[in-house]
């Protein structure tokens, strides 16, 4: 296990703790941090999911400084570090990691069959096409019926809302079934299908990309075929990419799973103007 | 164990069917909310208003298109106008500038004179009904609990509660109103202009309530309305007390008590 995965798990569980800690603090009337993962306010700094802001702008027909300012921080964060929200912070991604782990455990230990990456949409281009179509459709729907419809399928937001309801009222709302259904599909049918093919937040965040954005880079340039016969990096990638040549793909979440599996240590993070 | 027919009737009856936007009485948006159409567009269901509400007044809407949006259900817990929620809204669905409780235009309370104890007693002279229960009384709970007392609600002739335009619709009077199962005072929420959204009391607020205010039939010989008030106003505590003849003399001084 590489150190990167340790750091990633630490950040993921930290965000999970944060999600449960905010309503606990609010129960003790400490309002320094409020909100759910749709929109949080940390000591006066408002952080709102950009796709939520996008829908609110389209649905209400109003473009206000309040709305744009709230989305500024995540956009800047994505421009510098890439789509690390998905790979490093999103609590639903942590659950999906768990679902993939369960699937792998049953495939390899119980069923005695090698775990096959059952992805019908193998090419990253098709996956991108599906999720950007979904984002476009949802935003158009939000504008058409004046309701931010993508919030009904906003997995991290729903998760943190359920955490808040659980802490405050010791109950769960019906939206919990949505998360449960997604995880059931991930375990039984198609691993990582939500993050890879649909999640509107991930799709919109991946659009913010600049030459200085942190990306996975191969030290051996112009690698068209796998540089080694094992092709460990492609097997390790949760998003179904081939990291030796697709580090800059819009699907990449900078989760660093591919870095430590490379036998020659050829993969590393580039960006920050290092090019 | 209910039968299948009863179960279906329960599920699809008004108020329980998740697929229709069934109107719930005395359900308002939190203070400072923009009108309903823009609210549904701007509210991102982040539930921050729900988290900061110190009274637990704000509830999440259940299944349906309004799922996850905040509501104040006044019959369960009214809004106590602390104004903590409106300044925290990240998208402006609640007006961030709003701090004055008297400008929180959540709705307007309407008294149903056919249910209100005070109105029944004074206007309609309702006497004990068939079960012998006195249903007319001088209650005035709504006046006593109102945070904008004497601005939003006054007592007509010091007896009968009447609601004025300064009412912000916080719903405290609804929460405390003693009539069951329906409250005698109800909130017509702001921004829900359509009758099917605002319900029966919207029509009442618009003035179609002549039938409800027609005086009830009272038995002959019983004073009612203005006459009753006139009679009651004759009772005064400042008049001279009637003189009574005492059959014995009170001793001026009792011996041995010094």
Image: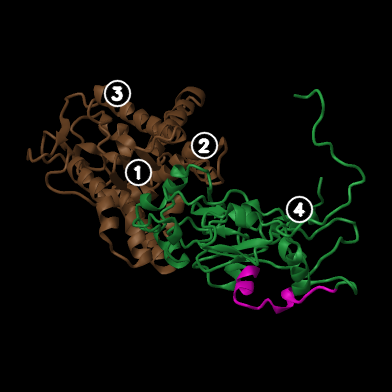
Chain colours: A brown, B green
- Dot 2 or dot 3, earlier in sequence: 3
A224 displayed left or right of B193: left
**Residue A249 in view, yes or no:** no
Task: Determine the CA span between mark 1 and mark 4.
Answer: 41 Å
Q: Is residue B95 placed above or below A211 in the rendered structure?
A: below
- Dot 1 or dot 3, earlier in sequence: 3
* Residue named by callout 1: A40
The chain identifier of the residue carrying mark 3 reads A
Q: Is residue B9 placed above or below A252 in the rendered structure?
A: below
- Residue at the spot 35% in from the left edge and 38% down from the top edge: A33
The chain identifier of the residue carrying mark 4 reads B
Q: Nearer the viewer, residue B208 or B119?
A: B119
- Which of the 4 quarters of the picture holds residue A173? top right
Question: Magenta stretch: residue B112 in it?
Answer: no
Q: Is residue A67 placed above or below A6 in the rendered structure?
A: below
Mark 2 or 3, closer to the camera: 2
Task: Determine the CA span between mark 2 and mark 3.
Answer: 31 Å
Label 1 close to label 3 by CB (< 8 Å): no
Count the marks: how many? 4
In the structure shown, which secondary structural element does the residue marked by tag 2 occupy? helix
* Residue named by callout 2: A168
Residue B198 placement (x, y as % from top left) = 58, 67
Mark 4 or 3, closer to the camera: 4
How crowded pointer 2 is (Cα within 10 Å; few <14, some 14-19, many 20+) is rated as: some
* Residue named by callout 4: B7
Task: Determine the CA span between mark 2 and mark 4.
Answer: 31 Å
- Extent of the magenta region: B200-217
């Amino acid at each position: 296990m590489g150190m990167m995965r340790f750091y990633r798990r630490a950040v993921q569980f930290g965000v999970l703790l944060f999600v449960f800690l905010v309503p606990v603090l609010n129960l003790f009337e400490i309002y320094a941090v409020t909100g759910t993962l749709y929109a949080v306010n940390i000591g006066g700094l408002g952080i709102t999911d950009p796709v939520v802001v996008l829908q609110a702008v389209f649905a209400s027909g109003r473009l206000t400084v309040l709305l744009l300012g709230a989305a500024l921080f995540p956009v800047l964060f994505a421009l510098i570090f890439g789509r690390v929200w998905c790979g490093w912070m999103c609590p639903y991604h942590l659950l999906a990691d768990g679902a993939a782990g369960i699937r792998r455990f049953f495939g390899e230990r119980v069923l005695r069959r090698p775990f096959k990456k059952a992805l019908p949409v193998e090419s990253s281009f098709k996956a991108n096409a599906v999720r950007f179509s979904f984002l476009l459709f949802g935003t158009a729907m939000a504008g058409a019926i004046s309701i931010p419809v993508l919030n009904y399928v906003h997995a991290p937001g729903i998760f943190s809302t359920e955490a808040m309801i659980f802490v405050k009222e010791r109950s769960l709302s019906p939206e919990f079934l949505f998360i449960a259904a997604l995880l059931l599909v991930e375990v039984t049918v198609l691993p990582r299908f939500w993050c890879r093919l649909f999640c509107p937040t991930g799709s919109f965040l991946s659009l913010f990309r600049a030459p200085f954005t942190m990306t996975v880079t191969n030290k051996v340039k112009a690698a068209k075929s796998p540089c080694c016969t094992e092709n460990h990096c492609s097997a390790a990638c949760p998003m179904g990419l081939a990291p030796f040549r697709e580090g800059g793909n819009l699907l990449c979440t900078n989760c660093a799973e591919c870095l430590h599996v490379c036998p020659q240590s050829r993969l590393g993070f580039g960006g920050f103007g290092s090019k | 164990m209910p039968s299948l027919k009863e179960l279906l009737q329960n599920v699809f009856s008004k108020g329980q069917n998740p697929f229709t936007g069934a109107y719930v009485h005395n359900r308002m948006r939190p203070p400072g909310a923009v009108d309903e159409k823009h609210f549904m567009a701007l509210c991102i269901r982040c539930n921050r208003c729900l988290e900061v509400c110190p009274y637990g007044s704000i509830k999440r809407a259940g299944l349906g298109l309004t799922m996850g949006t905040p509501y104040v259900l006044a019959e369960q817990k009214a809004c106590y106008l602390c104004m903590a929620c409106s300044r925290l809204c990240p998208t402006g669905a609640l007006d961030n500038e709003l701090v004055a409780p008297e400008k929180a235009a959540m709705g307007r309370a309407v008294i149903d004179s056919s249910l209100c104890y005070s109105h029944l007693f004074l206007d309609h002279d309702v006497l004990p009904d068939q079960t012998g229960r006195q249903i007319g009384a001088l209650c005035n709970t709504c006046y006593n609990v109102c945070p904008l007392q004497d601005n939003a609600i006054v007592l007509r002739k010091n007896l009968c509660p009447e609601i004025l335009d300064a009412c912000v619709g916080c719903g405290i009077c609804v929460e405390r109103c003693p009539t069951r199962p329906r409250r005698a005072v109800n909130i017509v929420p702001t921004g829900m202009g359509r009758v099917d959204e605002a319900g029966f009391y919207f029509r009442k607020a618009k003035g179609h309530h002549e039938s409800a205010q027609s005086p009830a039939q009272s038995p002959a010989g019983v004073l009612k309305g203005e006459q009753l008030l006139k009679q009651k106003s004759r009772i005064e505590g400042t008049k001279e007390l009637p003189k009574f003849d005492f059959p014995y003399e009170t001793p001026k001084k009792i011996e041995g008590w010094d």
